[in-house]
Image: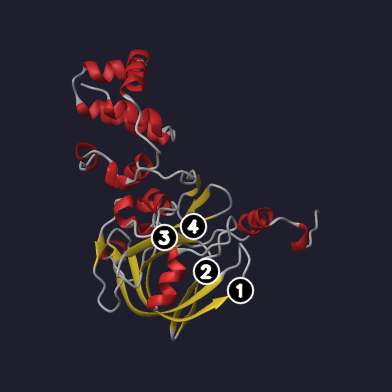
Amino acid sequence: MKSFSPAELATPQLQAYLQGAIAPRPIAFASTVDAEGRQNLSPFSFFNVFSANPPILVFSPARRVRGNTTKHTLENALATKEVVINVVNYDIVQQMSLSSTEYAEGVNEFEKAGLTPIASDVVKPFRVAESPVQFECKVNEVIALGTEGGAGNLIICEVVKLHISEAILDENGVIDQHKIDLVARLGGNWYSRSNMGLFEVPKPLVTLGIGVDAIPAHIKNDAFFSGNDLGMLGNIEALPSEEEIAIFAQESIALKGALSSDDRLNVNQLAKDYLEKQDILSAWKVLLAKI
C-alpha cells in the first residue's frame, strides 16, 4: 500500500486521489444571480444534505487550482445570499457538464447549456425546469477553508421551498429511485448512474464550447435530439468547415447512404450514432452535409 502525506503531493494529484476515492458524489447544480441580477449556473460535486430540521444542504465551490481565483457561484452567493440547488439526472448530464465550462462573467449558462430557466417562488435565482427536484435556498453562512488554489468554501444553505416533479413519484407520493435516475460524480471523466452503473462524460473543452445556443435552429429544435445530444453538440470549439464536410461526405460510405435516401431521419440517426461514440466532430459533419 502506498502512503502519502498531503504535503508531499501537488494539489492536482491530491485532488485526483480524493475525488477518485470519495465517490460517488451527488451533484449540486447551483443557479445564482450576481448583484446586477445576471444568471449563473454551474455544477459542484462537493455536495450533500446535512440536516432535515432545519433542512440544510452544503456545497463547496473550491478556489481554482490554476490561478487561485474564485468561481462566479461563490461570488454570487456571498453577494446575494440566495441559491437554487437543482438535482441532476441522466437526462441532463451532458448539458450539466457543458455548463461547467469557464464562460466569461455575465454569460448565461442556461442559454449555453440549452436549459430552461423558470422563476423561483421565494428566491431570485431561476430554477432548471428540466431538473426533477429543485431546492430554493437561503445562504446561512459561507465558510472559507483556505486561501490557496484548491481550497473549498462551504456554502451552507437552508431550503425554503422545494419542487418535485410528479413524474418521479410512486403511488405513495415517495420519490421512486428508478424514476428519478440520478447521476453522481466519480474521479476523472467517470460518473455513476444510480440504476445502471458507470459511464464516462468527457470534460468540457478548456477552450470554450460553442454552446447549445449556437446550434442551428433546425437541429436544436428537432425533437429527434435529446438534451444530452445537444449538450454534446455544444461542446465543440468551432463547427467544421465546408471543405472538411465535403471530404467527410466523399469518404463516408454510411453518410453517402444516408444522403442518398433523401431522408433526414437517416441522417439524424447516423449523427446520433457518432454521438454515442463521443465523436462530436463527425456528428457535426453528418448534420451539416447537404441532402
Q: Tell me the kind of residue under disc 2.
A: Ser
Image point (53%, 74%), residue name: 154
Closer to the chain start, of discs 1 and 2, is: 2
Q: Which of 259/245 is in front? A: 245
Q: Tell me the kind of residue under disc 4.
A: Ala
- Residue 287 in picture, x, y percent from top left: 28, 29
Mark pair 4, 3: CA separation:
15 Å
- Residue 68 in picture, x, y percent from top left: 58, 61
Q: Tell me the kind of residue under disc 1.
A: Leu
Secondary structure under the numbered disc 3 in the rendered image: strand
Secondary structure under the numbered disc 1 in the rendered image: loop
Could you tell me if the residues under marks 1 and 2 are in contact, i.e. CB atoms within 8 Å?
yes
Could you tell me if the residues under marks 1 and 4 are in contact, i.e. CB atoms within 8 Å?
no
Residue hosting label 4: 184
Mark pair 1, 4: CA separation:
24 Å
Mark pair 3, 2: CA separation:
12 Å
Closer to the chain start, of discs 3 and 1, is: 3
Label 3 crowding class (10 Å Cα cut-off): few <14, some 14-19, many 20+? many
Residue hosting label 2: 60
Closer to the chain start, of discs 1 and 4, is: 1
Secondary structure under the numbered disc 4 in the rendered image: strand
Q: For residue 42, which numbered disc appears in the image?
A: 3
Mark pair 4, 2: CA separation:
16 Å
Q: For residue 145, which numbered disc appears in the image?
A: 1
- Residue 57 in picture, x, y percent from top left: 46, 75
Q: Quadrant of residue 169?
A: bottom left
Is residue 257 toward the left or the right of residue 3 in the image? left
Could you tell me if the residues under marks 3 and 2 are in contact, i.e. CB atoms within 8 Å?
no
Q: For residue 166, which numbered disc appears in the image?
A: none
